[in-house]
Image: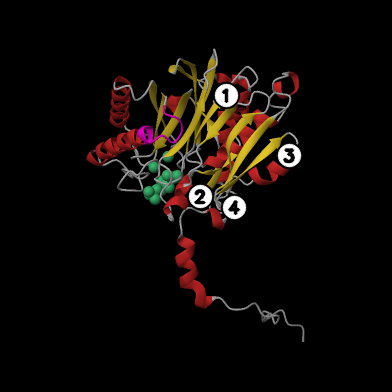
Amino acid sequence: MITLSIIKADTGGFVGHSAVHPRLMAEARREIERAKSSGLLIDGHVESCGDDISLIMTHAYGQEAGLIHSFAWDTFQATTHLAKELGLYGAGQDLLSDAFSGNLRGMGPGYAELEFEERPSEPVLCFLADKTEPGAWNLPLYKMFADPSNTAGLVIDEKMHAGFAFEVYDLYEDRRIVFDCPAELYDMLMYIGAPARYVIHSVRSKTLGMTAAATSTQRLSLIAGKYVGKDDPVMIVRCQSGLPAVGEALEPFSFAYSVAGCMRGSHHAPFMPVATGQAHPSRFDGPPRVVALGFQIKDGRLIGPRDMFDDPAFDGARRQATEVMDYLRRHGPFEPHRLPLEDLEYTTMTSLTARLAHRWTPITTEVATPVGSRTE
Ligand code: F6R
Ligand code: MG
Ligand code: MG
């Protein structure tokens, strides 16, 4: 068995919240090399999306392993130290605790992990996003694993025909449920159509009995009890041979669907699939970006990556994202561009409510008639 872990954190932005400084990337890469030579990791790769650093690692320690999580924590401490030295923006913003205690659950960094028996050929996609939330993966996971219009294999591949089991987390109540699809698809859509609260955590093949996808589901805003930045999510999707083909796993991103995030984590904006070189949200801190890194895993080694959205076939989605961004921006501070009050990441409403409390009066049935419009 090997474990593929993506552990990510925003430890300081360059410039503002738009990207990671090259020196932080170099520091993280040095740490990964050290961990490889010490034998902790089988392999590792460092990538960024927006202002988040992702450590993509293979190892033999399983999911939620103390050794791996503490290595990531220490690496993010090191990049935070550097971020402070360079005066980068929001240095250490995702490290919510002063001390590491066992694993990263509730500590700020996000992670998606998958432990599996490596197949003779193991194609895997690692999706990294910035300026959005974990529920952003609900729509593409539904399309990849449950929508025959997206994934032809659900109909014509015998190994996929029985469908997939989706594990869904309720982030508000800290509970989970498993939906058996396609039988329970409509039940599931009722929940995952509300991605701020219900998030697909993993997907399992019913025929092959293997987990095919895993997402990061930590909500920083809820963990911290106050706004500390969007918990920009990551996702692992294993592909081919009874799982969605690479092209089926990428296909949902040919549509620049709307996600929550963008400016101040408080706006709906289109999700733009980009090559790694374009993964730097600039306009209105957006549009939110997604990159896809393809690897073949061999004896735990990460062969790759291939920059999967570096393909003109996704130009249409990028154009669409730009158009949708123009359209939504024209709403200014109005919904549906701005998120509904309960999903806003900034809390002006609390102080505003207190300040204006005494100014609100009951709406009476007697409505004063404006002078001048009286008839008698
Ligand atoms: C969104 C995000 C940014 C910031 C915005 C304001 O997830 O990180 O859009 O919310 O740039 O940042 P502050 O409040 O730090 O000035
Ligand atoms: Mg940031
Ligand atoms: Mg970010």
Q: Secondary structure at mark 4?
A: loop
Q: To which quarter of the image does residue 22 belong? A: top left
Disc 1 residue type? Phe
Q: Which mark is residue 184?
A: 3
- Ligand 1 neighbours mark 2 (CB distance < 8 Å): yes
Q: Earlier in the sequence, mark 4 or mark 1?
A: 1
Residue at 62 percent of width and 30 percent of height: 204
Asked if residue 55 shows in the view, the reply is yes
Rate crowding at label 4 as few (under 14), some (14 to 19) or many (20 or more) other CA atoms within 10 Å: few
Residue at 34 percent of width and 40 percent of height: 11
Q: Which mark is residue 175?
A: none
Q: Secondary structure at mark 2?
A: loop
Report the coloring of the rendering: secondary structure
Please report contact status of discs 2 and 4: CB closer than 8 Å, yes or no.
Answer: no
Asked if residue 255 shows in the view, the reply is no
The residue singled out by tag 1 in the image is 314
Q: Earlier in the sequence, mark 2 or mark 1?
A: 2
Q: Which residues are magenta?
A: 61-69
The residue singled out by tag 2 in the image is 266
Give the Cα distance between marks 4 and 3.
Answer: 32 Å
